[in-house]
Amino acid sequence: MKQRYVCANGGASWAALVSLGIIFAAVLSAYANREASKPNMPPDWVAAGTPASRVAVAAADGSGGGIAGCPAGGCDLGDCMLTQSLDTATNGDNQVACGIAGVGTTANGWARCYNLVNEGVPVGQNLTINSVTFGVQQATTDGINIDVVLYVDSDGCPPDEPGLDAEVLASQSLVVNMADEGSMITVEFPAGPVVAAGSDLIVEIVSVDDGTVPPEFQFRAMSNPNGQCGPSYIRTPDGDCDLTGWGDLASLGFPDAHLIQVISATVGGAGDPCPWDLNGSGDVGILDLLALLAAWGPNPGDPADFDGDGTVGILDLLTLLANWGPCA
């Protein structure tokens, strides 16, 4: 007859196989449930605080959440401080970032834009940047790469987009982690980058997603609801949240998210000590006056736009006349 192979403990083997099948099915089910629980959605704005704080309207004064009539800064010759934050208290839970709730944030850039004249820097004076201070609301344990970037805005505030109207002046890099949460960080600019007289300065804090951090990439720059003298901006370098250039946080629906930022600077830094000498002759005279008149009208970025308002006009003319004669 035909030979048959018989397992002496066949009953036990079948029971073991059934058990393994049950365990395997349970593992597959758990994996499927985990995958199903992952957010399958594009990044969106993630904000702390109560939903009631998110109101999709800008401030009534049109300043993007700023306070009407906020006084200009007091930068005379020598050291000075630029800030649009009415205070730097780290008591707010109003930070905003592009990301997926419960998973992490994407790369974000938080910025403010400063018109030197409006901030109290004397007309015709350059500004040397010494340091930038900002707050860390949230960061992951393994660390987040941060770039602090200074730009010069070629057509004046509000800013549009790097490479479009914002030219990089200088940048510094650092790493922050969970130990820095709730603290203010000061980043030095030892080279002393100089912002030309009458220019608009953009200062941005960028969280760099370079792939070296875990999937739970988390960083939010510190904000508070305590008032501001100018708009707070955000952008997503990778184009997430349908935003590539800088957007006003108030107009995006976050009027209480006021970015905390303080700039230490020195008025009267290096650079052109006589910007009114438009032809470089060493004195301010008739040829400079003719050059100013030739540039008259809307002319953002023109050397004759001494006050940086985007127009060569009567104030620029008066500034030139006030500096008539040999350059000091």
Image: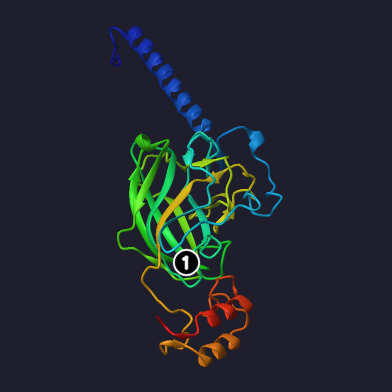
Return the residue nearer the eye: 93 or 39.
93
Assign a secondary structure to mark 1: strand
Q: Quadrant of residue 178?
A: top left
Can residue 41 be seen by looking at this rendering?
no
Q: Residue at x 41, y 14 (%)?
A: 18
Q: Position of residue 129 (x, y in %)?
A: 39, 60
Which quadrant of the figure contains the C terminus? bottom left
Q: Is residue 169 left or right of residue 67?
A: left
**Residue 177: where, in percent of width, then height?**
35, 39
Q: Which residue is mark 1?
A: 152
Q: Residue 280: x and y, percent? A: 42, 87
Q: Is residue 35 left or right of residue 297?
A: left
Q: Could you say which quadrant of the image residue 321 lies in?
A: bottom right
Counting from the top left corner in percent of width and height, residue 134 is at 43, 47
Say what amino acid the circle numbered 1 marks: Val
Which residue is at a point 49% across and 64% down the rendered structure image? 121
